[in-house]
Image (cartoon, helix red, strand yellow):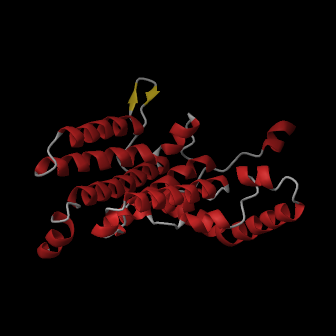
Amino acid sequence: MGHWLYRNLVEPGKLPLFLALASFVVTFVVTRVVVRLIRAGKGPFGNVKAGDLHIHHVVPGVVLTVIGGFGAVAGSRYGFWPCVSAVVFGVGTGLVLDEFALILHLDDVYWTEDGRKSVEVVVVTAALLGLMLSGFSPLGVNDLSDQEAQNRASAIGTIVLNFLFVLLALSKGKARTAVFGVIVPFIALVGAVRLAKPASPWARRFYRHRPRARARSRLRAYRHDRRWAVRARRVQEWIGGKPDPVPDRSLSDRR
């Protein structure tokens, strides 16, 4: 086991990345367990407050992220210090991204439908770090041989082309495909050539006078949501907890 760790993590210089990923995932899991216990009123845990001010865990997360990030930049690239900085950075990032939805909406939406965005961001981030740890490199530059790497024009052309595919995928509303396309070369091509989502900028711009394309886009989105939305919702609830039920406004209006 020690030989495997040295050969696959220490020798290639991937140990800090592995520690950052491990501390990131562990911090997120522990944080979700703790907040779910607080929500259920179980255990010795409770919300951190300074008087009447509720201090969200994104606050210490930002502090740890800053310390870990600057520590990694200022410290040596070798030895014990990069590993410490990686762990601190991973813990801080886990705390911050667990409340990503609160930062995005500037509101306490942790236990609402909008709070699901935090779980999505954490899963995507962990998946991307896992891909990088497995050997994938952004834009696939490491896939070039020594001879090919000398041809800068070819490398730049590959990067630019892949970047255009990423932009097209984003414009068509395929955010996840675009994000993974940055890490895995040309995976964004799948999102770039497929039909755009109904509410995407591409659909609003190019499907405006194409009723058949709009109808196909809506039908595909409906089938996709019917097939995957329920499953994705169950997975999100299993990871992050079930959101609070939305109150029926019609009943409140009657009162």
Q: Please tell me which residue is depicted at 43% across the width and 62% down the height of the picture.
A: 154
Q: In this view, does 145 lie above or below 209?
A: below
Image location of residue 138, percent across then percent down: 40, 59
Label count reads 0
Residue nearer the viewer, 237 or 125: 125
Extreme top residue here?
Answer: 51
- Camera sees residue 255: no
Q: Please tell me which residue is depicted at 22% across the width and 43% down the height of the picture.
A: 72
- Camera sees residue 90: yes
Q: Is residue 222 left or right of residue 104?
A: right
Residue nearer the viewer, 67 or 214: 214
Image quadrant occupied by the C terminus: top right
Residue nearer the viewer, 177 or 150: 150
Residue nearer the viewer, 32 or 129: 129
Image location of residue 131, percent across then percent down: 38, 66
Q: Please tell me which residue is depicted at 25% across the width and 37% down the height of the picture.
A: 70
Q: Which of the 4 image quarters holds residue 76?
A: top left
Image quadrant occupied by the N terminus: bottom left
Q: In this view, does 213 lie to the left or right of 101?
A: right
Image location of residue 174, percent across then percent down: 62, 59
Q: Please tell me which residue is depicted at 56% across the width and 62% down the height of the picture.
A: 177
Image location of residue 54, percent across then percent down: 45, 31
